[in-house]
Amino acid sequence: MSENQRRELIRVAEDLKGLSNEETRQFISRIVADLTDLKPSIAFVGQIKAGKSRLINGFTGQAEFLPSDVNPWTTVITDMHFGHPSGRTRGAEFHFFDNRQWQSLIAEGEELRNMFPDDEDSYKREMIEEQVDAMKARAKLRLGMSYKDLLGQHHDLENLTTDDLARYVCAGDDPTDDGNHDPGSDRGLYSDITRKAEVYFDIGHFPFPLTVTDTPGVNDPLLIREEISRQYLKESDFFVVVLSAHQALSRADLKLFRLMQALELGQIVVFINRVDELGGGAEDAVKVRADVIDGLDKALGNSDIDVLMGSAQWAHYALTGDDTGVNHDHVLAWLRAHPEQMKQYLDGVEEIKQGPGPISREGVLRFAAMIASGLPDLRRHVTSALTHGPRDEQLRMAWQHLDSFAKGELERSRAHLRAIEEEISGKPESEDDNDKTLAGLRAKVADKTSEIIGGMDEVLANLRGVMDDTVAEAVSDVVRGPNGDSPLLAKGGETELNFGPLRDSMRELVQGATQVIRQRMLSELYAIDMQSNAALRALPGWQDQTDNRMNTSAVRWFRPDTTALTRGITVELRVTWLSRLISRKSVVTRAENMIVQEFEMIGDDLVDTARSDLLERLNTVLDHYMALLAGHLESRSGSSETNAKAEAQEAYNNARRVADELDTVFGADAANETLPEAAE
């Protein structure tokens, strides 16, 4: 769905609230809040010196916003918000560390390093702690007495200048270096305590609101920067992994990809930057791309990650006119080697010719450079993936709920109008009777809900027991080794323990148990639906509504969250600490006990998360259903107003308008489109 459709859904939902009862209005308000906050995020990640900052400048159209010299940043994540839900389009907020966040940074980094350690990880924690202490020391020198007061606070700037940005996110002079530090300069004044920068823009050339994030580089000599980047991975919906054409898919790159795969992150695209610096031009670039694709397949196994190519330098020239280091013959040669981009270029030139002004050679060259840069292709790729991915699913679910409410309101208003026009004889159902009926239905639903939750808890309790047994058996097999030859006692002082099969088994157990719960929930919800409708049909003069079926999609589409399985185990891959223990036997026993405990904790998190997610979805289904029933019963109340017919006609007209607008917003075929059913 497009951004206009999202906005129209919000507008129509607000109109629908004015036609609905209190219970329905509360549910619609939740939908409006979700639609308002729907803002996907894109993170650019990769090694230092891969050209991320200049690439982001080209991607966003903010030509020189992010400094793109070799090493301008400190430990700062920079979120660039385009079309933020708040409506803010300028200025920035800078959030400062506090002592708890610094310590959390160190602790969480330890977990990530334990997942895929290398030869240097044994001393990284100590180095990071030293670097955090150094940051604090520099900040105290720069900020003086105000240092402690600023921790945990934030600065909000209504307008943002380049100098402002430099004060918060650029390194600046080292105040501990008397020879180079300029006491009068405030460049980098707050940099050592700045945790994150949030900068606001209008929506620009993007089709919907989104956030573009610049992360410090991985494989950075300043390890704290790398830690910030790695820990931010879970915060984004889409990732652009930037590789340098000179050293594409190095050991550090592969380690980053494996970590992203283990964390089960969202969609990923690879962008090979700096193709303008390859001596063989497009021919060399084809070889580099093929090597990257082959390397990803071998390392990750059928990774199916799209790989694009281009040059941030060419995009920089296109935006600024600065052609330093740009060879125009190379740009045109690149276009000739890529027919699709050449077509974009030729079509664009024709469009420029139709414009009112004269065509300049400089303008045509800059346009050619932008197409060759690959940035327009990258923008289309990312926005298309986001449009047809989770964002589209969220919008469709919102539309289905709103459409259900709108049709229900239309049927209620039609029935009310018909009843008045036909002057139905007999005493109308009183509000007290409606209240009693609704209260009875609520009591039945509450009783059934308790049964559903009780049944769910029984399955999850059994899951905990089976999972604990599975953990104990699998850990014992791995730690004690085949034939009792524990790999922990092998020569060399360190070893690798493979718990991949155990993680797979735990994932299958959770998926199997939650599928059983999901099927039982659907069966019980169907029973609630049938029983409630039977009770309504028993009411005098009751007429079935077209929308009185329960919408169980939130439960049907449930999939368990298994991200806890990506958590590192303290002794999973490195056990050099065991050499400090007294006996060889205690090495194996203690390691086995510790690993079992940690996997049991992961199992508990899996079960607790599944329970809370299932309960939330169950409540969503029932809240929506009870709102519909309340609306149906409300429509049975009679009216003693002299202008009852006019009011009923107006209510019907408004309901008809809202229902028609919803159909228009989502398209002619929307009513026949549904999200995929969960696998049975």
Image: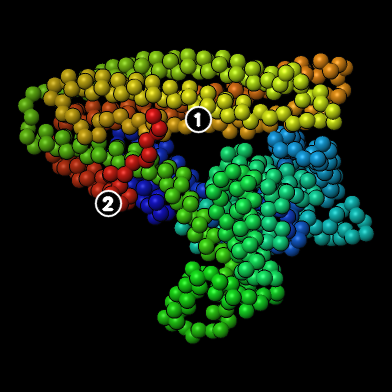
Residue behind mark 1: 560
The one of 605 and 519 positioned closer to us in this rendering: 519
Asked if the residue at tag 2 contacts the one at tag 1, i.e. Cβ–Cβ closer than 8 Å, the answer is no
For numbered disc 2, what is the local secondary structure?
Answer: loop
What's the residue type where badge 1 is placed? Pro
Question: Is 280 displayed left or right of 356 in the figure?
Answer: right
- Residue 133, by quadrant, is top right
Q: CA distance from mark 1 to mark 2?
A: 33 Å
What's the residue type where badge 2 is placed? Ala
Find residue 78 and report its horizontal and vertical position in percent. 65, 52
Question: Is 272 displayed left or right of 86 in the figure?
Answer: right
Question: Is 166 displayed left or right of 381 in the figure?
Answer: right
Find residue 22 and report its horizontal and vertical position in percent. 33, 32
Residue drawn at x 60%, y 23% as measured from the top left: 603
For numbered disc 1, what is the local secondary structure?
Answer: loop
The extreme right residue here reads: 179
Residue drawn at x 53%, y 64% as measured from the top left: 376
Find residue 73 and report its horizontal and vertical position in percent. 74, 55
**Quarter of the figure that contains the C terminus:** top left
Residue behind mark 2: 668
- Residue 407, by quadrant, is top left
The correct choice, above or below, for 80 with respect to 622 in the image is below
The one of 304 and 121 positioned closer to us in this rendering: 304
The correct choice, above or below, for 207 with respect to 433 in the image is below
Find residue 546 and report its horizontal and vertical position in percent. 21, 34
Is residue 75 at all visible to an observer of this figure? no
Residue drawn at x 50%, y 48% as measured from the top left: 39
Q: Earlier in the sequence, mark 1 or mark 2?
A: 1
Is residue 625 at all visible to an observer of this figure? yes
The extreme front residue here reads: 483
**Number of residues whose C-alpha sits closer than 10 Å to that of mark 2, classed few (under 14), some (14–19) or many (20 or more):** few
